Image (cartoon, rainbow, N blue to C red):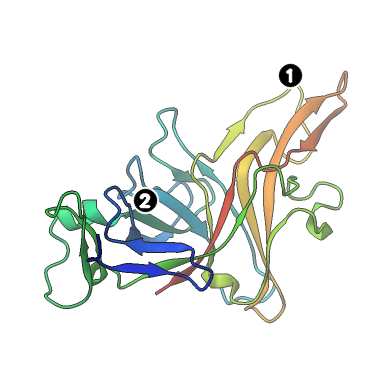
Amino acid sequence: MTYGFRVTGADNNYQIDSRDTSPQFLAVKADGSLGDGGSPSTYAIGDILFGGFESTTANATKDILVNFNSSGVSPTFIDGGHFVVLRPTNTMIAAGEASDNYGIQIKNSGSPSLISFDSRIMSKGMEIKEVKATNSIAGGYPGVDSWDTQTDNEVYNGTGLKDIYVGINSGSKHHGTVSGTTPPNAAANAWLGFRYIYDANGTSGKIKLINATVANFGGTNNAYVELNNLQQIIIGKFIQ
């Protein structure tokens, strides 16, 4: 087969190929900010959810903690934050969201009625900057020992922090106590949360992994124990 549209990167890595009969390309379905306990109403199973903290305030910090219900839906931003929802473009096109007649449109070679890619719905985007492998980043809990100054728990460190978002699908935060006592700092365990820490210039800074559990060492000797990331961490740059 010699017809179609194919794009590869500088090292021949796959990007777009109209000959692929089952591709899925993602586009921004929704974005915005949420207050404490807020939930993006557009999120559905199959979407990719990113969380972030858009700020220009010097020395600002923000914990992005998201709790999914037992069915894996209804993500709640416990302390608020910013969000971006990515969704496969073919489902968005089916909903009639691309009505203009310009741009690049790629149809599926196995099913010409299925549109694999359409540039007309991509006024915003998420550039994937890096993917952290499972078990590659140390976790911790804010305020515990030297957590704020560690470097092995950094997910990102650099400029343009307000545009950097982190994938947070399957995150959760569980409240409770261990053996009837209250652990240090807070009665909670947190999985796959992130803290944004802005530098004094209000533009650069770092993102740290919040991931810890509470261990009971006997009596009232409870303590947070850091956990490495239990799943891949996707770091993206929100283009708007």
Left or right placement of residue 132 versus residue 106 in this view: right
**Residue at x 75% of width, y 17% of height:** 179
Q: Is residue 57 left or right of residue 17?
A: right
Q: Quadrant of residue 104?
A: bottom left
* Front-most of residues 121 and 176: 121
In which image quadrant can residue 162 be found?
bottom right
Task: Tell me, for residue 40, which label it has, or none.
Answer: 2
Query: Could you give the CA–CA distance between mark 2 and mark 1, rounded to whole angstroms?
Result: 35 Å
Q: Disc 2 or 1, which lies upstream in sequence?
A: 2
Q: 183 or 193, which is in the foreground? A: 193
Q: Which residue is rendered at x = 74% and y = 19% of the image?
A: 180
Query: Measured along the vertical axis of the image, is residue 134 above or below residue 126?
Result: above
Residue at position x 21%, y 76% in the image: 103
Residue at (49, 67) in percent of width and height: 12
Q: Residue type at mark 2?
A: Pro
Helix, strand, or loop for circle 2?
A: loop
Q: Which residue is mark 1?
A: 180
Viewport quadrant of the C terminus: bottom left
Above or below, 154 relative to 121: above
Q: How many marks?
A: 2
